[in-house]
Image (cartoon, rainbow, N blue to C red):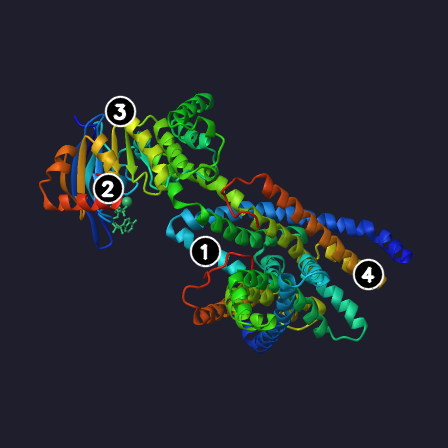
Amino acid sequence: MALLEVKDIHKRYGTEQVLKGVSFQVERGQTVVVIGPSGTGKSTLLRCINRLTEPDRGQVWLDGVEVTSPRADINRIRAQIGFVFQDFNLFTHLTALDNVRLGLVRVKRLPREQATRRAREELARVGLADKEKAYPAQLSGGQQQRVSIARALAMDPKLILFDEPTSALDPELIGEVLQVMVELAREGMTMVVVTHEMGFARSVADEIIFMEGGVIVEHGPPERLFTSPQVPRTAEFLNKISELYGET
Amino acid sequence: MSDFLNFVAEHLPLLLSGLGATVTLTVVAIWLGFGLGLSLALVRTYAIAPLRALARTYIALVRGTPLITQLFVVYHGLPQLGITFTPFTAAIVGLTLNSAAYQAEYFRGAILAVRRGQLMAARALGMTKLQTIRHVVLPQIIRLVIPSWANELVYLIKYSSLASLIQVRELTFQARHIASETYRTMEIFLVAAAIYLSLVLVVSYVLRRVELWVRIPGLGAPGR
Amino acid sequence: MGGKIEALEVLWSALPRLLAGVRVTVELTALFLGVGLVSGFLVAVAQVYGRGPLRWGATVFEQVFRGVPALVLLFLLYFGLTEVGISRLAAAVLALGLRSGAYQSQIFRGALLAVPTGQLLAARALGMTGLQTIRHVVLPQAVRLALPGWSNEYAIVLKDTSYVFAIGLVELMREGTYIVARTFGRYSLEVYLFVALVYLVLVYGGNLALSLLARRLAIPGQEARAESLERM
Ligand SMILES: Nc1ncnc2c1ncn2[C@@H]1O[C@H](COP(=O)(O)OP(=O)(O)OP(=O)(O)O)[C@@H](O)[C@H]1O
Ligand SMILES: [Mg+2]
């Protein structure tokens, strides 16, 4: 059984049909990369998975539990799904350590000491052991994003969703964040990543999904998608992206 | 000059008792107004539509009318409905209801300043709406609101002088009383003005220190 | 509680007096705001562009007139000035007008400082004098930037005109107390609520007019923030 199953998700904003029936599966330990032009509904899709946005139609299953069921305890499920935002969304009033600790103490209800230990481990894992006392405003963008990854990891999630985690970063800071993500993939974390970083997609993804206009146009393993895409649109998009981002 | 000092010394006890009442009025009203104002702001931002409208209307009504009129409604008007207050209680009620409306707006400004993405991040961690308000929104708005809140305290010190018009024996009332007994009106009001001014300056200074004390890098304006 | 109908009759028969009170209130508001506008602008200019004792004096003036309650200022100038033969009205205009000036100076100071210094340099580079720069470059921008704050100040001054009833000037609030006294306090709730309603209309009516004016004067790309959360 797949860890994550997304079935026929629809979402409309006003008159605009943003998602027109999206389905896919993610196996345990897999990294799935979602690519596609701007405004295609990639962020909306990720947010439908943990219901930060309510889908109009369709189902999401996580590890045999229906996330979209009206009877689901959504807060408990969200605690099992990490989410990393494009603009970090760290809590301004909390230090790096407290940012990571908040969910542990308030949602998982770990005892304070245990939460602190856990939070320190995760900060160390993303290479920020020495920054635990810093407030978000005192960290670089790359460091903030790593704290936010630590915040997601600390909850011990079954799955982490990344929404363009490097798009808000200066070029020289992108590497440190990607490196953390590569290691996570290697350690067997299940991840769904929306990104324009084709180098990352090529080397880490088990599966690439190309979305456009609210539907999945094509999906498959990176070797196939990059070398012999079945749909002309996919080739066109990949060409444009590699031109823009200078990646091959 | 020494005549003036004698005059002041003679009436100082009465002025100080008035000052005591002024401070009590202000302190009680600011805290009650804090509780009511924060609740109003939360209701106005997060509650269901009819409650939001109710809070908004209340705030608009209070902000659109003079405090004197409000005090007169409470002190002279409400007895008609069988609700009678002593002057002091009427002043507390009036000042609290008034300050709450203004404080609600300060809090609302601060709530709007908390970045939306952080609310989403909290929900993504599995926090409930209440937990999000309690652990993410409140700690930020309390800090963000301190400068406006300091202003409000200063306003209340000054506006509490209107309580003298419904016979509360605070500083302004006592000054008028002394003036009517001694006819040394200018002098006594100069003294009263000096007392108010010192109080206001000291309070402003202390609150600025508090603001620096609880400041968090990146939260709120860098310096004022 | 008196009957509702009777209360309406009382208000109806007192309407001419109340309207006369409204008129005085509006006139006082205009006077206070006018005195405040001139004094406030001068104080702001002294604070931003002045130096030495001029700047220092402006700041002391501002602190004193903002730090002392309006009611106390009013009593102080009323008792102080009527002794030397100055009228009650003049004393009130000085007290509340200059107080508004102290607040308006803050608004103008903010607006003056918001005009980018590069533009002042550019004006001087064109050969404009300091006064010309203020008149043709700073003022037109500052006035627009000050409008939202000024709308707030209008509401404050309008409501604070009610203080002058304490020194015996007959405006809206005082007319209200007369009606209450004439009817032996039987309709005090209705009368004061009605007075409150009149203030409400004046405050929000004036604010609406000022926001329309602000929209009218708006320069593309420089629209001021619509709503103020400040105390008013
Ligand atoms: N909360 C919302 N209300 C209304 N419309 C929305 C909302 N969120 C997204 N949209 C619209 O839905 C469409 C898809 O947006 P979405 O952010 O999911 O696209 P995306 O693929 O993530 O794009 P990008 O690459 O720019 O992040 C856009 O046209 C957007 O304007
Ligand atoms: Mg997006």
Type of residue at label 2? Leu
Looking at the rendering, which quadrant does residue B73 occupy? bottom right
Is the CB–ligand 2 distance for label 3 below 8 Å?
A: no
- The nearer-to-camera label among 4 and 2 is 2
Residue receiving disc 4: B187
Residue A3 or residue A14, whichever sits in front: A3
> Which image quadrant shows ligand 2?
top left
Give coordinates of residue C176: x percent, y percent.
61, 69
Label 4 and label 2 in one chain: no
Looking at the rendering, which quadrant does residue A86 occupy? top left
Describe the element under mark 3 as helix, strand or loop.
helix
Type of residue at label 3? Arg
Q: Residues within 10 Å of mark 2 (few under 14, many from 20)?
A: many
Q: Residue at x 31, y 28 (%)?
A: A157
> Which of the labelled discs sits on residue B56, or is there none?
1
Residue receiving disc 3: A186
Residue receiving disc 2: A45
Give coordinates of residue C138: x percent, y percent.
54, 68
Q: Residues within 10 Å of mark 4 (few under 14, many from 20)?
A: some
Judged from this view, the residue extending furthest toward the left is A230
Type of residue at label 1? Arg
Q: CA distance from mark 3 to mark 1?
A: 54 Å
